[in-house]
Amino acid sequence: MILRPFRGGISPAAYPVLAPPLLLVQHAAVALAFRAGGAPVPLDEGFWLLPLRRLGALSSLTGIHAAFVFAATLLSYAALAALSFRRAARSHMGFGLAAFTVLPGFQAGAVILLAFLPFNLRSPHEAGDPEPAEEEEEGRPGADVAHALQGLFAGMAILVLAVLLSALAFGAYGWGLFVMTPFLVGFTTAYLANRRNPLEQMQSNMLVMSAAMLGAVSLLMLALEGLVCILLLAPLALGVAMIGGVIGRGLALDRNARDRPLMVVALLPAVFALEAAVPPSAAMDTRESIDISAPPAAVWRALTSEEPIAVPAGLLARAGLAYPLRGRLLGKAVGAERLGYFSTGAARERITAWEPGRSLAFRVLTQPPAMEEMSPYRRVHAPHVSGYFTTGETRFSLRPLAAGGTRLTVTASHRLKIDPIPYWEPLARWATSANSRRVLLDIKTKAERVR
C-alpha cells in the first residue's frame, strides 16, 4: 500500500534512531557543496543551526550544486515530516511540533521534544472510534462532496491569508511562506477532504493541486502577487503541497485525534514573526569577463558612454526583471555620482574608483525595484520587488592583452534576503550574470566600432 509509510504510529525506539540522520542530510549536502567549490566547510554555530543560509557565503556556488543541496534537503524534510507526524499520531499530540520539523532552526528542538513525548495514550479504539475498513484505504465511491469542498476552500484560504500576514504584515519571505505554508495547504486540504469518506489517492492529489492553483489565482486577482513570481515558485510550492497532502490523507484515514492536526495552521503567524525578527541575508558575488579587439582607451570611452545599451534584453525583459538601459556620469572623479537607468527606474550610485583606461567602480546608493510584476493591475502589493535583492559595489577592470586588445571584467556584490537560499540564489545569479554579459557585449560592440 502506498500510504503505509504515512499511516499509523511509530515505535518509541524508532523515532530517535531515524530522525537525527534525516536531520543531518542538509548539513552533509551543504558540506559537499563547499568541498565541491574548493572552500573549507564553516563548522560554526550558523552551520549547525541554519546550514542552508551558509551557502550564501560560497561565492563559487553553481546552479547544479544549489539544486543538489535543495533537492536533498527537501527529500529529507519530507521523510522527517512523515516520520514526525507518525510519532505525533502515536501520542495523539505534538502535531505542532511535527510541523516545525520542516522549519530550519527549529527542527532539532522539535525532534528532541517529539522523541520524549509519551506514547500509547489512547488508541482510536479506546476513544470509541471504529477502525477504518481496509477498503477505505483505497477509497470508495460516494466521497463526501461537502468535505472535499471544505478542504479545497480551506487550502485556498490558508495560502491567501499566509501571504497577507507574511508579506504585507511582517515583510517575511522565508521557509514559513514558501515551504511551511504550501505544506499546510496540502495537509489541510487532504485531511479535511478524506476525514469521512476517503478519496482515492489520485483524487486527493488533484484536490490539493486545485487548492494551490485556486490560491495562486486569488493572489493574482487580489494584486498580492504577480504572474512571474507565482510561476517561479510553482515547482517548489506544488511539490511541497503534494507531500503535505499525502501525510494529511494518511492521518485522516487513521481517524487520529479528530481535528487536532489542523491546529498546526495556527502556528503560521508565530513562524512569520520569528522569520521577520531574524531575516535571511546571503552575500552573492558575480564575475563576468569579455575579450575586446580594441585598446583600453577605446574600451574606456565605450564604458563611460551615455549611449543607450543596444543589445536586446531578451528573456529578462519578457520576465519583467530589471535590466540596465544606459548610464550617466554626473562627475568624473571618486566621490562623484552616477545615474544608472533601468527598465524599472533609476539607481543613484557613487563612484568609488576612477582610473581612466584601468578601473571604474561605483557603489549603489538607491536602486529601483528588482522586477516589474506581470499582473492585470497597475500596482501589485508585493514588497519583495524592493529591498530583498540589493547590489552593493560594481567594478569594471580593464587589462591590456598582448595582441593590442583588452580584457574587460565586471565584478559585483549582491545581497539576497529571501529564503530558501538554495532555491532563489541560482535564479538571482542567472539574472545578474545575464545583465552583466549584456553590458559587456554592448561595450565590446561600441569599442570595436570606434577603435
Image (cartoon, grey):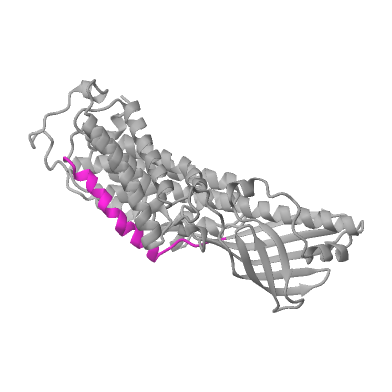
Q: Is residue 339 visible?
A: yes
Q: Quadrant of the C terminus?
A: bottom right
Which segment did they paint magenta? 258-283
Q: Which of these two is toward me, 167 or 33? A: 167
Q: Is residue 18 visible?
A: no
Q: Residue at x 47, y 62 (%)?
A: 44
What percent of the width, then of the height, locates residue 254? 20, 33
Q: Residue at x 27, y 34 (%)?
A: 249
What percent of the width, then of the height, locates residue 219? 41, 48
Residue 358 as seen in the image, left or right of residue 377: right
Q: Is residue 201 above or below residue 188?
A: above
What percent of the width, then of the height, locates residue 414? 59, 62
Q: Quadrant of residue 271?
A: bottom left
Q: Quadrant of the N terminus?
A: top left
Residue 269 in magenta stretch: yes
Q: Quadrant of residue 308?
A: bottom right
What percent of the width, then of the height, locates residue 387? 51, 64
Q: Which of these two is toward me, 369 or 116? A: 369
Residue 161 in magenta stretch: no
Residue 287 as seen in the image, left or right of residue 366: right
Q: Which of these two is toward me, 190 or 5? A: 190
Total marks placed: 0
Q: Is residue 326 above or below residue 65?
A: below
Residue 139 as seen in the image, left or right of residue 32: left
Q: Residue at x 42, y 49 (%)?
A: 178
